[in-house]
Amino acid sequence: MKFYLDTANMEEIKRITRLGLVDGVTTNPTIIAKENRDFEETIKEICSIVDGPVSAEVIGLAVDEMVEEARNIATWAPNVVVKIPMTEDGLEAVNILSKEGIKTNVTLIFSVAQGLMAAKAGATYVSPFVGRVDDIGEDGIELIQNLKTTLANYGFETEIITASVRTISHLEKAAKAGADIATIPGSLLPKLWKHPLTDNGIKQFLEDWEKVPKKAESLS
Ligand code: E4P
């Protein structure tokens, strides 16, 4: 499973990159706004740090606006991926861009049908939002399982990015369902490697180590 960071925060990206856990980055306008910096400058900096795909979202909603923005964003770095919203205009834009070799990530996917349409239109990635599906009383992980099966049935190369990941359980279940990628907020990541029993175990081992006679002590 590939791990993307769902953040535009440079400190978080650098910290997690040092652990070898970052295969890519996703952003959206909300994530970009949190950093209070220029959009293009932020994406270019992330692309220079991270080897893998970095998603940057268009703002326009009409086909022509999205295509124009996407063509511009695609010039920012070789590893940039253009995020397009799941609408009729979005599908048309994805179809045009895929034929030009511009990589796309279709975002705001909430059903298998939407994921299938995006894949059919030529999306490189689709982003089903598990947390937001759970928020409306449905099962986000079931969406991942069903979309994975559906795309596999027809041999689509489109990769599934599990997005809107809020919990450790989301990540574990998405991995079990065979999602290609999970994009994880910087705030959730440390919780993935931490466990209270690990901390207790280290504390206990260090306390017990104090009881082991050291060379100088055992001679006296
Ligand atoms: C990433 O591609 C999505 O924009 C992001 O995961 C959405 O997360 P949220 O539902 O927690 O805002």
Image: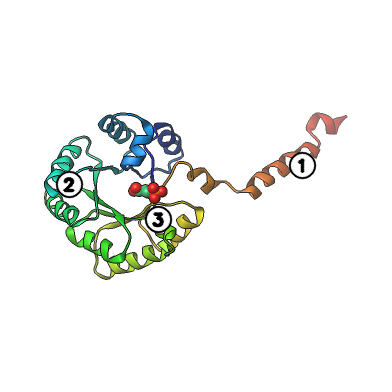
Q: Secondary structure at mark 3?
A: helix
The residue at 31%/64% (across/down) is 111
Give the position of the N terminus as an image quadrant: bottom left
Label 1, on which residue?
208
Report whether 184 appears left or right of 155.
right
At which x and y percent is residue 193? 54, 47
Q: Pick whichever, 61 or 37, lies toward us.
A: 61
Is residue 45 visible in this depiction of the protein? yes
Q: Earlier in the sequence, mark 3 or mark 1?
A: 3
Label 3, on which residue?
132
At which x and y percent is residue 99? 12, 52
At which x and y percent is residue 31? 36, 40
Q: Is mark 3 within 8 Å of ligand 1?
A: yes
- Residue 44, picture quadrant: top left
Q: Is mark 1 within 8 Å of ligand 1?
A: no
Is residue 3 visible in this depiction of the protein? no
Q: For the residue marked with disc 1, what is the amino acid?
A: Asp
Residue most toward the bottom? Answer: 153
- Residue 158, picture quadrant: bottom left
The residue at 69%/46% (across/down) is 200
Q: For the residue marked with disc 3, what is the amino acid?
A: Arg
- Look at discs 3 and 1 and give the one toward the viewer: 3
At which x and y percent is residue 163? 37, 52
Q: Is label 3 in contact with label 1 (beta carbons under 8 Å)?
A: no
Report whether 203 appears left or right of 143.
right
Label 2, on which residue?
102
What is the crowding at mark 1: few (fewer than 14 residues within 10 Å), some, or many (at least 20)?
few
